[in-house]
Image (cartoon, helix red, strand yellow):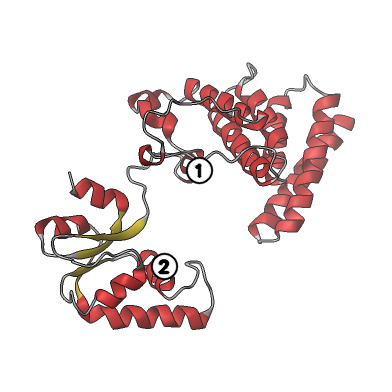
Amino acid sequence: MAEKSLYSTAIYHHQQALVFKQEGKFEQAKATFESAAKAYDTYLKRFPRSKNAYEMEFYLAECLYNSLQFSEAARHYAAVRDSSQDVKYQAESSFSAVLSWQKQVELDTKEKKCPELKVLKSSERPENEKPKLLPICESAKALVAAADAYVKSAKPDDDKVPNIANVDAKFHEAFSHGVPTDYGKVGIGYRKDMVSEPIASWADLWSLAPKYSGKIVFLDFDRDTIGSALRYKGFSGNTQDESELEQAKQALIDIKPHLLAIKGYDVAASLVKGDAAIVMDWDYDVALGQG
């Protein structure tokens, strides 16, 4: 009876937490996930050899993650990943352990428990400077270990994509059945042989539009065009202010007569061919266009 009661209590809290999460009641969801985690933990301590133990361990990890207890969640995901009892949740737990440690590193960095290490470009390093080993915090070490374990337990098809180990965990979370082919930032590309002025901001682009009218291409993606117009007006790209959004809309209307085209692909090709002098494009597309 005690085992059944603990099992039912944990499942009830877990299901209720999922309902709160779906309804957008995140504070209630977090508290209820905490209650479910405690119930699962109590069950596992009292009945470690139960036939339900494997599944309960995974549910415990899920509740710990959703209640923002990332390091504990990672440890329990790892236990499920390494379990010899079953393999039902092995792949998911292997990835979730990586994601949990990644979240913990982010928290530790914000709390100054981990150093914020910037990845330097070659142009930012002094010439002939020798690489130096830098210490990393414990959660970062755990993240590396979890990532290594994930690569070792990768699905058979992953062997066909050896660079999958270099894909950030957030992409695995968003696209669990594939990997990204392109990833970059939106910016401004222009030909120096066609544009005499330097362009260093969206304000520069807008101010030069009349001069280079008919030689400008914009992206056919609302987030990119609206976001760029918002930045031109000095607003956050994530603003929800109606007045700011209206100003961005008007800025796009104002520049539209000067556009050669609004394209969803081959934007850099217009630049390479010389049809366009200035483009709004993704950095990787411009780089690929340069050959």
**Residue 182 visible in this rendered orientation of the protein:** yes
Q: Position of residue 239 (x, y in %)?
A: 52, 71
Query: Is residue 88 in view from this perspective?
Result: no
Task: Indicate the amino acid at tag 1.
Answer: Lys
Type of amino acid at the residue the image marks with label 2: Gly
In the picture, measured across the screen, residue 253 lies left or right of residue 145, that is left
Residue 34: x %, y % from top left? 78, 45
Residue depicted at 17% across the width and 65% down the height: 277
- Badge 2 crowding class, 10 Å Cα cut-off, few under 14, some 14 to 19, many 20 or more, is many
Q: Residue at x 66, y 44 (%)?
A: 107
Q: Quadrant of residue 155?
A: top left
Residue 283: % across, % down: 31, 52
> Which residue bears the numbered disc 2?
227
Q: List the residue tagged with mark 1.
A: 170
38 and 281: which one is in front?
A: 281
**Which residue is the extreme one toward the right?**
2
Element type at marker 1? helix
Question: Could you tell me which quadrant the N terminus lies in?
Answer: top right
Q: Could you tell me which quadrant the C terminus lies in?
A: top left
In-image side of 206 versus 137 (left or right): left
Q: Determine whether the residue tagged by mark 2 lies in a helix, strand or loop.
A: helix
